[in-house]
Amino acid sequence: MLCFCKYLIVIRLIFGTSFKKNNASFESKTRESLIGINQSRSFPTRIQTIIFTLKFCSLEKSTLTENRVQDYQQFSSIFYRTFSREGYLNPSSSESNSYSGSINFNCRSSAHMRFIQTLKFCKLLDANEIRFYNIKNKNKRIKNLLRFCFPNKANDLRVFSSSLMELNRSNYLNVLITLSSKVIRSVTLILFRLNMKQLKRLMAACRHLKSFNLYDCTLSIPVVPDFSRALINCNFQELSFFNCGDFYFGTWEYNLEEFKNLVQGLANSLNLRLSLKKVDISGCRINQKEAEEIFAKNQLTGVKIINKLQNHP
């Protein structure tokens, strides 16, 4: 407790007078406050500084006035540049993007897992993209991070499973559905197994997004699902089922009925038929002409079908 108070007092003393109209002074003060992260050789000390700064930010952001919004945005930029040196952040390649970069958590990294454990209830600052690599089934640290620490806004979310994992209520399904409202542009899930009910719930929660992507996933669709209610007011422009029909994940080449069920189920949504512009079925081993016929039969003639790697060697 004493250690926490010491860090918090130092941060408040540094930042208490720094949110001013003088941007140059603000940036100088901010750099001074974060330079300790780079100078310290101790991993725990660097992490503590980051954590306490995050706590400070969450407190200050809730009381920002209009005159201090620009100062806070400057602080976020400087903070994330420092954050990137710790190996958790890739700087954004887009200069026009309002967020600072892509945050990466590798669940096989002991350093990353220690940081995740240390975060506890600290909310991360807004970011361009959040990526989780190699998540394992029922990892409480990851589940708590998703539940309590996910930023208020992120353009994109990518979740990579460490192996083919069933996505259900006992692991990450409910928390992903809850936090999907904080994602603005796209959700991508890789190496998951989904049945019709799980897929419908997930797509319904993400229907405000421009893009919804499933890579290397196994989809169980024995009958035609009804997406008419789940995708009301849907904004999907792009869907991807990359490799979902591959030999290892669904064998749609020899089980075409499941693919037909999926397309017919999606076409039940009038909103989706109006918004959808592109579907990627690359690696699904489906003949292009046959795919076009299935889409046309379900009133999806205006949709561009991406179908690379049609035949595996």
Image (cartoon, grey):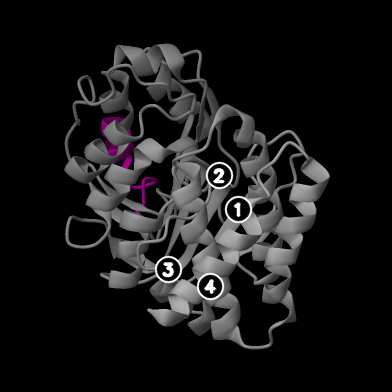
Q: Tags 2 and 3 in contact by the CB under 8 Å rule?
A: no
Kindly report the distance in space between the C-alpha atoms of the residues bearing marks 2 and 4. Answer: 57 Å
Q: Earlier in the sequence, mark 1 or mark 3?
A: 1
Q: Earlier in the sequence, mark 2 or mark 3?
A: 3
- Seen from the viewer's position, the closer of residues 71 and 15 is 15
Amino acid found under the numbered disc labelled 3: Leu
- Image coordinates of residue 97 in percent, x first then y, are 68, 36
For mark 4, give the secondary structure. Answer: helix
- Density class for disc 3 (Cα within 10 Å; few <14, some 14-19, many ≥20) is many
| Residue at which label 2 appears | 310
Residue displayed at 37% across by 18% down: 272
Kindly report the distance in space between the C-alpha atoms of the residues bearing marks 1 and 3. Answer: 23 Å
| Residue at which label 1 appears | 16
- Seen from the viewer's position, the closer of residues 257 and 146 is 146
Amino acid found under the numbered disc labelled 4: Tyr
In the image, farthest residue toward the bottom:
42
| Residue at which label 4 appears | 7
Q: Earlier in the sequence, mark 2 or mark 1?
A: 1
| Residue at which label 3 appears | 119
Amino acid found under the numbered disc labelled 2: Gln
- Image coordinates of residue 37 in percent, x first then y, are 67, 74
